[in-house]
Image (cartoon, rainbow, N blue to C red):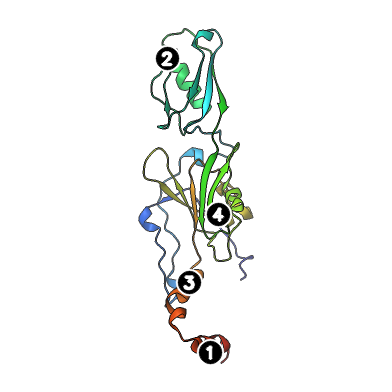
Amino acid sequence: MSYEGAQRQPRNWAQPIRVGHVIAVLGIAGLSSCQPLPDVAHALPPPLIAPTPDYRLQAGDQFDLRFRENPELNDSVTVQPDGRFSILLAQNIQAAGRTVPDITRELTQVYSKELVKPQLSVILRATLPTRIYVGGEVNSPGEYLTIGPPLTLVQAIARAGGLKNSANPDQIILARRSGGKEPYLYSISFNNATTGVAPGEDIPMQPYDSLFIPRTPVANVYLAYQQYFQQFLPTSFSYGLSSTAGLP
């Protein structure tokens, strides 16, 4: 069966994997020993799989706080490097990673203790570029910045020049930090996202997401051959191998 004609079954990509599992085992003796990355039965947070997510604030973003009946409380806010902000009646409010509606609801609850019916609006005024990182088997790995709607997985890979022929499109690794120091790792299939098998896998990127595209097992073996064998073989012997390939 050809690669294009192979039947693909949708899978639940939204399953994190432990850092220790992201180890490619090179089976030079036999490619059948290369196994896909294992999944762990935990669901991703809902914001990852939302089809049209709201923008999530990050450090350096600026927004205005406006009160309809109490303009004296109006304020302009900049999210601090720690991801928080403080205003007159609300101290150390977490903003990074949250949406404008999230902030509006929390501030409404806070000001309800002082005002009968606070009518406030949070107006996003300025945002910093969203930074994401794409590495591994793409043609132009590096850091990419975007302003406005976040790039999706497919768009991010396209920005990085697309996949190399040596890329493994079914085991892309997404590293995402959600407020903690240690990243969460997820396995995603590029093929599922682009062939219509599971279009939900074309997820929106979040600030400081990192994508790593590994090599296929065949590419790993070829790289190992180049690194550990070809450089030590005499030129005449290497030529003999290539010239007799395919002969009985």
Q: CA distance from mark 4 to mark 3?
A: 31 Å
Q: CA distance from mark 1 to mark 4?
A: 45 Å
Q: Which residue is mark 3?
A: 223
Q: Which residue is mark 4?
A: 10
Local crowd at mark 4 within 10 Å, few (<14), some, or many (≥20)?
A: few
Q: CA distance from mark 4 to mark 2?
A: 50 Å
Amino acid on which the number 3 mark rests in the picture: Leu
Residue 64 image position (x, y, % from top left): 54, 20
Local crowd at mark 3 within 10 Å, few (<14), some, or many (≥20)?
A: some
Amino acid on which the number 4 mark rests in the picture: Pro
Q: Residue drawn 42% across and 70% down?
A: 26
Label located before the other in sequence (4 or 3):
4
Q: Secondary structure at mark 3?
A: helix
Q: Which mark is residue 178?
A: none
Q: Looking at the picture, tell me which residue is in the foreground, 186 or 138.
A: 138
Residue 5 image position (x, y, % from top left): 64, 65
Local crowd at mark 2 within 10 Å, few (<14), some, or many (≥20)?
A: few
Instruction: Report if the CB atoms under discs 4 and 2 are less than 8 Å apart.
Output: no
Label located before the other in sequence (3 or 2):
2
Q: Looking at the picture, tell me which residue is in the foreground, 205 or 143.
A: 143
Q: CA distance from mark 3 to mark 1?
A: 20 Å
Q: Which mark is residue 88?
A: 2
Local crowd at mark 1 within 10 Å, few (<14), some, or many (≥20)?
A: few
Label located before the other in sequence (2 or 1):
2
Q: Which residue is mark 1?
A: 240
Left or right relative to 248: residue 15: left
> In the picture, which quadrant includes the C terminus?
bottom right
Amino acid on which the number 1 mark rests in the picture: Gly
Above or below for 233 versus 166 = below
Q: Secondary structure at mark 2?
A: loop
